[in-house]
Image (spheres, rainbow, N blue to C red):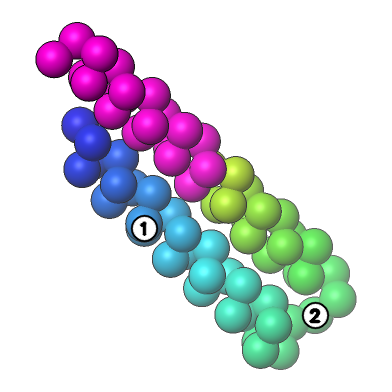
Amino acid sequence: MKYVLRVIQVSTLLGGAEFLALLLFGDLKESVQPVVFGAVCASLIFAGVLGILDRKISKRKKTNG
């Protein structure tokens, strides 16, 4: 389970990095920039939540094992 969360977390962060590169270096219209910024923020928040879940699962396994 731990590795599944890590894979999802890394893929989410890479997707966020892709959107961030698009935001910084892409030729986006003014109306699209807030949407891309929201996607970057959402991916960072989602990756952070997955990191917290990963730590809680690891801590629970250490306590039980």
Q: Quadrant of residue 12?
A: bottom left
Vertical order, 25 against 10 (above or below): below
Is disc 1 placed on a helix, strand or loop? helix
Vertical order, 50 against 40 (above or below): above
* First to last magenta residue range: 47-65
Where is residue 56? Give x, y as percent: 38, 24
Give the residue pinned by disc 2: 29
Residue 14 counted in the magenta span: no
Which residue extends farthest right? 30
* Left or right, residue 12 beside residue 28: left
Residue drawn at 25 percent across, 13 percent down: 63
Residue 58 counted in the magenta span: yes
Spatial CA distance of label 2 from label 1 is 26 Å
* Left or right, residue 7 beside residue 32: left
Specify few, some or many for label 1: CA neighbours under 10 Å numbering under 14, 14-19, or 20 or more: some
Give the residue pinned by disc 1: 11
Specify few, some or many for label 2: CA neighbours under 10 Å numbering under 14, 14-19, or 20 or more: few
Where is residue 6? Give x, y as percent: 30, 47
